[in-house]
Structures are given as structure tokens and as C-alpha cells.
Image (cartoon, rainbow, N blue to C red):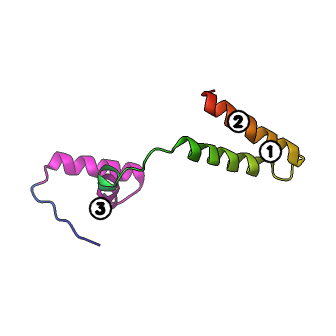
Amino acid sequence: MATLTVRNLPDSTRDAIRVAAARHGRSMEAEVRVALEQTFRPEKPALTAQERLARIDAAVLQAYAGKRPDWTVDDFIVERRQAAERGE
């Protein structure tokens, strides 16, 4: 891990970091680390329609596992896929 030193930081910025750190229950160092990570880490690409459908499938299977006969899960997944493709 790298170390970064910031010189000539205005007192008002330091004070704002201190307040934010206290609000979030972190040290000032941890607060700055979180702010830098959120600002500079690569963004995750948006999910494709197929990935969204796969997540829906998994959620439905988990939600209905052991609660209903198999026919409802498969039929419901097909219905939800068709609705998502139509944009509903």
C-alpha cells in the first residue's frame, strides 16, 4: 500500500474532514481514504439486460425455493423475462 502526504491543506478543509469523520465514526485518515476511493476507483460498468435478468432469476429462485411447486418458479421466470424485454 502506498502512503500519501498532503501539504498546505487549508484549515477549513481539515475541519470539514474532521466533522465528516466524526459523523461516520471513522478516523480522519479513514475518512480521507474512503473519499479518495469513492472518487478515483474505476466505476463498475452498468449491468446488461441479460445480467439483470440473471439476477432476477436468482432472486426468484431463492425467494420461492421450497415454498411452491416447481411449475411456479419456471413459469414466473419466463413471465418476468418477457416483461423485462418489453420494458415493463
Residue 64 percent location from the top left of the image:
80, 47
Question: Which amino acid is tagged 3?
Answer: Glu
Which residue lies most toward the left here?
8
Instruction: Please tell me the numbered disc located at residue 39.
Output: none
Q: Which of marks 2 and 3 is in front?
A: 2
Residue 40 point in image, percent of width and height = 29, 53
Say which residue appears at 31% left-offset and 52% top-offset.
Answer: 35
Q: What element carries label 3?
A: helix
Which residue shows up at 35% across the image and 56% down it? 34
Question: Where the N terminus falls, by quadrant?
Answer: bottom left
SS label for mark 1: helix
Query: What residue sits 69% from the left and 33% below the top?
Result: 82
Q: Which comes before the other along the chain, label 1 or label 2?
A: 1
Determine if the magenta segment contains residue 29: yes
Question: Disc 3 or 1, which lies upstream in sequence?
Answer: 3
Q: What's the amino acid at mark 2?
A: Arg
Determine which residue is flagged by label 1: 74
The residue closer to the viewer here, 8 or 12, is 8
- Which residue corresponds to mark 2? 80
Q: In which quarter of the image is residue 53?
A: top right
Instruction: Determine which residue is flagged by label 3.
Output: 29
Q: What stretch is highlighted in magenta?
A: 9-35
Residue shown at the point (74%, 34%) measured from the top left: 79
In the rendered view, tell whether residue 13 sits above or below residue 32.
above
**Which kind of residue does numbered mark 1 sit on?**
Asp
Task: Report the side of 10 relative to 67 (left or right).
Answer: left
User: Where's residue 84, x and y in %?
Assistant: 63, 33
User: Along the polypeptide, which appears first: circle 2 or circle 3?
Assistant: 3
Calculate the distance from the C-alpha at mark 1 to the C-alpha at mark 2.
10 Å
Quarter of the picture holding the C terminus: top right
